[in-house]
């Protein structure tokens, strides 16, 4: 593990000096650090990843500091285009250190594929006929991925649902698969396609869709932390943060933004490690709507000592072995930096970062408002948009922050004054 993730004042270093400091803490990462320096993806490799490749787009990778997860010091790679996200996650992680950081857990890595059966004359009897063949069907699924079975994964269960829909009845079979350290889409889709003809025959209907569900509610990841009231601005700030979070429990308009703040952290680590951002996002939002009404993914409480106790649970379909995680050198470097050994461990780290990000945004909103911290850091982007270059960027952004007006027209005026 990193010797310490408490690297104070990194903001004042150059990117190369920061990278050196990170390497000092995580020696095992040094061989791969170059991939982060360069972006890691040449056009030949890009051309093997997607179709019709014509180039690449770069996104900055920052390192979130101060994280302790289950007692492990960890420096977290975050790929994001949004200013203040890395700062915010690092800031809240710092506040959790005195209470031990983040504590996480997760379910087994169980993904589900759905096989849709149509034109079944006797759906409820068909459901039971399918259950009667459970062992044979699981064996058939496992025969499609013997290596996964060898490493302890494979098909585990069948769930059969009869959905009386608006226009028809669907018999839907869920194949539950332990996908090991994979995200698992390809493994479960292959198994689902193999089972479909058998299921059609048993049910007396025909199969149509055979595809993974992104509502990965059997693959849940959880994180919690406690922040002393004194660290986060006092009792009133804690009470206001809980009231702000309750707003997101009660109102879907607020919940969407609250959860977007969570995804600021989650998507950044998912992206840095080459995982499928859409799969994680679809899982998160479907989980947020699991009780019918869209609501927040996290819970804010005040514990018996008057401290802020925050927790989160969401699906976390991420892998270490497949997809771009294996093929993108920068993703490999990110995994090495985070020092995670299993997909579950990666998922739990991502969940902790999402929680940290969420707490940071809610604290800022309940205290001074979002613009102060966020716009101060966004000012450099605004300065660049206005045409500032080199030293001008920091001078223009500092002048805008001092004026309290972070806008392109203001940046243009300040820049013109500087250059006059
Ligand atoms: C921005 C801060 C952290 C400043 O907060 P601050 O209290 O001014 O920070 P500080 O200068 O006292 O520094 C404290 C620590 O924060 C970190 N930190 C602080 N500044 C930097 C920096 N420049 N670069 C790197 N790290 C930084 C760093 O860990 C630092 O420790 P140190 O290294 O000094 O020992 C705070 O204002 C904040 O957390 N704001 C919220 C930012 C946020 O949530 N941004 C997301 C974008 S807004 C959005 O998309 C979602 C939203 C808000 O709508 C969601 C919702 O509604 O719920
Ligand atoms: N709806 C969705 O979200 C969909 C997503 N996708 C995409 O699918 C990709 C992810 O699929 P995924 O199945 O994870 O990727 P891969 O198929 O690339 O990798 C998984 C395979 O890796 C092998 N493997 C080696 N070591 C392990 C291990 N320790 N644990 C588990 N498997 C291991 C297994 O194959 P073997 O047994 O052959 O060795 C396994 O089937 C992503 O790119 C995603 O974007 C695709 C379709 C739909």
Image (cartoon, rainbow, N blue to C red):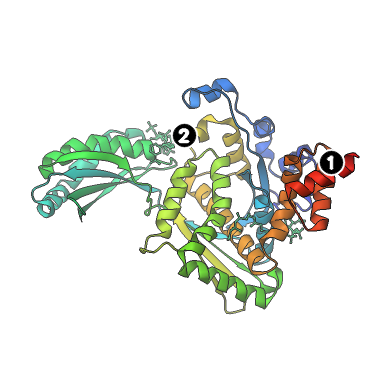
Residue 392 is labelled as 1
Element assignment for label 1: helix
State left or right for residue 388 relative to residue 331.
right
Ligand 2 shows up in the quarter that is: top left
Q: Is residue 335 above or below residue 73?
A: above
Say which label, 2 or 1, has the lower sequence index: 2
Whether label 2 touches label 1, CB < 8 Å: no
Instruction: Give how far across and how far down residue 275 sits, in percent.
Output: 50, 40
Of 251 and 403, nearer the camera is 403
Q: Is residue 307 visible?
A: no
Residue indicated by mark 2: 323
Mark 2, ligand 2, within 8 Å: the answer is: yes
Element assignment for label 2: helix
Q: Quadrant of the C terminus?
A: top right
Instruction: Give how far across and how far down residue 378 sits, in percent.
Output: 71, 50
**Badge 1: residue crowd in 10 Å (few <14, some 14–19, many ≥20):** some
């Amino acid at each position: 593990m990193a010797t310490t993730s408490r690297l104070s004042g990194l903001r004042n270093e150059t990117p190369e000096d920061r990278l050196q400091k990170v390497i000092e803490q995580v020696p095992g990462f040094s061989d791969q650090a170059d991939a982060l320096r360069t972006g890691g993806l040449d056009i030949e490799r890009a051309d093997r990843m997607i179709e019709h490749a014509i180039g690449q787009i770069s996104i900055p990778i920052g390192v979130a500091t101060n994280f302790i997860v289950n007692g492990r010091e960890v420096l977290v790679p975050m790929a994001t285009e949004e200013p203040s996200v890395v700062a915010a996650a690092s800031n809240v992680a710092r506040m959790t250190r005195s209470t031990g950081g983040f504590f996480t857990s997760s379910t087994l890595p169980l993904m589900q594929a759905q096989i849709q059966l149509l034109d079944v004359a006797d759906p409820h009897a068909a459901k039971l006929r399918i259950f009667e063949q459970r062992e044979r069907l699981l064996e058939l699924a496992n025969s499609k991925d013997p290596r996964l079975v060898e490493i302890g994964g494979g098909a585990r269960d069948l769930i059969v649902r009869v959905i009386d829909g608006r226009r028809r009845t669907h018999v839907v079979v869920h194949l539950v698969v332990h996908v090991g350290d994979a995200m698992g889409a390809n493994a479960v889709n292959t198994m689902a396609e193999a089972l479909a003809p058998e299921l059609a025959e048993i049910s007396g209907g025909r199969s149509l869709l055979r595809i993974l569900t992104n509502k990965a509610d059997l693959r849940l990841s959880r994180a919690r932390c406690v922040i002393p009231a004194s660290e986060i601005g006092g009792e009133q700030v804690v009470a206001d943060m809980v009231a702000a979070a309750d707003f997101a429990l009660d109102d879907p308009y607020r919940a969407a933004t609250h959860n977007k703040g969570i995804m600021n952290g989650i998507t950044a680590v998912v992206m840095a490690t080459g995982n499928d951002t859409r799969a994680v996002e679809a899982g998160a939002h479907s989980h947020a709507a699991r009780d019918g009404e869209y609501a927040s993914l996290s819970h804010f409480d005040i514990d018996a000592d008057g401290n802020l106790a925050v927790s989160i649970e969401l699906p976390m379909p991420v892998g270490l072995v497949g997809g771009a995680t294996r093929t993108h050198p920068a993703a490999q470097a990110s995994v090495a930096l985070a020092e995670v050994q299993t997909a579950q461990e990666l998922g739990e780290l991502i969940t902790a970062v999402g929680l940290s990000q969420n707490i940071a945004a809610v604290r800022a909103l309940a205290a001074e408002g979002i613009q102060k911290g966020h716009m101060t850091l966004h000012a450099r982007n605004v300065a660049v948009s206005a045409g500032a270059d080199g030293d001008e960027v920091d001078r223009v952004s500092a002048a805008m922050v001092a004026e309290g007006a972070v806008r392109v027209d203001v940046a243009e005026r300040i820049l013109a004054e500087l250059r006059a």
